[in-house]
Amino acid sequence: MRPEILFPLFAEIDSLPGIGPRLKPLVERLIGGAHLVDLLWHLPTGLIDRRFSPPLTETIDGAIVTLDVFVERHEPSPDRRRPYRIICRTDDGFVTLVFFNARGKYLNEVLPEGEKRIISGKIDHYRGEYQITHPDRIGTEAERDAIQTVEPVYPMSAGVTGKTLTKAIQSALSHVPDLPEWHDPALQKRHGWPDFKTALFQVHKPEDDRDLLPDHAARNRLAYDELLANQLALTLIRAKMKKLGGRSIAGDGGLRRQLGEQLPFSLTGAQQRALKDINDDMASTGRMLRLLQGDVGSGKTVVALMAMLNAVETGRQAALMAPTEILARQHFETIAPMLEKIGVTCTLLTGRDKGKARQKILDGLASGEFAVAVGTHALFQDSVAFHDLAFAVVDEQHRFGVHQRLMLAGKGTAVDVLVMTATPIPRTLTLTAFGDMEVSRLDEKPPGRLPVDTRVLPIDKVEDVTAGIGRAMRQGAKIYWVCPLVEDSEIIDLQAAEERHRILVDQFGEGRVGLVHGKMKGKDKDIVMDRFAHGDLSILVATTVIEVGVNVPEATIMVIEHAERFGLAQLHQLRGRIGRGSGASTCLLLYGAPLGEMSKARLKIMRETEDGFIIAEEDLRLRGAGEVLGTRQSGLQAYRLANLDLHGDLLAIARDDARLIVDRDPDLQSPRGQSLRFLLYLFERDEAVRYFRSG
């Protein structure tokens, strides 16, 4: 249960004045949450200083000024196309206030003729006279202190005004309680950090530009709060997993030997090292939680399958969970035939299975008839019960939260969990997303894989490219054609894909060109994918739905339109869809001119290396951690107060601090531990608190 003292911060934002039913969804989208605390995490990026009140003759065009004026006369416009003008006098001249599409009644109320007012806005010269167009602030002498201040400027989005947002955030600040300090006093003193409440007030009420810098003590402190909350949650879960204890799983190796004899290749050194790590974890009595990071095509699935067979050899069950139906189906199609040959039963469960067919699968899992289950998140729904689940594999971990991982682990007794990702993650970021896990890396490609020939071409060469793929098709090649990302709109992405599909159909015929995109139903996607993998389709036009996991060894050409719009990690993932068979493969990156410096650097790296780990480190260097952690590129958790490019040194301190805290006080029972519980709840790391309570 969240402590009562924090309840006000988790009130809905529409409990604040000025945020009604129309504004609420717009503000939620802007701040990334629905509670007062989410408003507090929305930090200003600039400021407007309204304290500047010079004589008219000393003003600079474009500057924000606050002036005492006497309202001389109103000059309403004869038609709405012309501005409404109000002539005002100051101590040393005249200034005209200009309003477009004005409401005369309102302007007469706020700026009555013959009265003094305080106005603030951007001053300019027009035809030899001073003027302020649409002043930002208008008030009486009594409101001077409220007007003549420094105003924070926040990141904005359509439909939300700065005035409304600022008012809501200032109101949210009034609900911040006095909380006990959770930081080590020596650390706080060394960095000169204020307490939590003071820090929040300082960041939202900046006095000058220095207060906006990321190394300002208040901003630094809040960034560290967020980093520590994250590291502490991960460390607690990891410690609890170990402490809860597991059971020793060590098969006799019989099934694994049979599988090895079937494989047309021998395992790489990296695969063998990863399997040793996994087998050692499984054999120990501790609970396993390991991340298997493997570049595209490095053979993660075989490692996972070998580990699953270790559990099956002891008479228990294993499960593999994938984030999408396409991936789950593909994993099933890859491993089921191999398992069948060695007499191991396997089933597939997705959200699409209904009625009697679904019940048959559920009965088979509960009775132990199926030794291996492959599926989507449908695997951890309440209705699914295993006979004796001992080992779970979670593929593409970043699509699942920690709590979903725990739910799957909860489907058996002391389940060992292996998490796999094909998104190479820089070492620094592995800590932030997977700090609760041990890590194994597959950094070798299986023997016999040829490097992909990557070429960079301007988009106006698209007709030459089309002619080239026509020749390749006649020799039996299969081709992916990936359409560009357009802003953040799936609809516009889709239009681009449909248009490219139409052009290619006109050229090569309806029966040779397929289309898949994110708006299609799972069943329809599967039909097209199946026709591409096993049937008559030679070209698959796609949005980025093919990014992860799709396996068609016959595909040897990848065309990516407007490659400059994609992140490095994403380009690397897409390129990984080819070069999976024995044939030579080509990736064509088509770019639109003119190219920015970052885009040039990105495409150069793609041309020079296929090593996903090098690419990930370069991506981090080029775009910064905030971008690499952003949802669009990798799905990893993005920070709201910390910026890893600027606060990277604090991450290392937070990791060490978290380990020390958990070593000394694993249940957070000490006075500092009790304070740290507030921190975990503030940053909504409730699963960590729940976990050590339930454990």
Image (cartoon, rainbow, N blue to C red):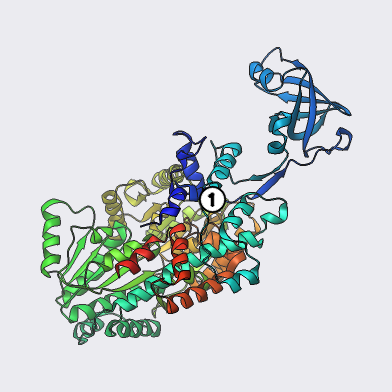
x and y, in percent, of residue 663 in the image: 43, 79
Residue lying at the far top of the rendered structure: 78
Nearer to us in this view, 564 or 49: 49
From the image, tell me which residue sits under label 1.
40
Query: Which residue lies at the image location 14% right of the left edge and 61% below the top edge?
Result: 361
The image quarter in which residue 503 lies: top left
**Residue 122 shows in this picture:** yes
Q: Is residue 298 above or below residue 123?
A: below
In the image, taking residue 689 as reference, residue 171 lies left or right, namely right
x and y, in percent, of residue 373 in the image: 21, 67
The image quarter in which residue 297 lies: bottom left
Nearer to us in this view, 568 or 508: 568
Please, what secondary structure does the residue beneath circle 1 have?
helix
Nearer to us in this view, 216 or 595: 216
Query: Which residue lies at the image location 47% right of the left edge and 73% below the top edge?
Result: 451
- Name the image quarter holding the N terminus: bottom left
- Categorize mark 1 by other alpha carbons within 10 Å: few (<14), some (14-19), many (20+): many
Residue lying at the far bottom of the rendered structure: 252
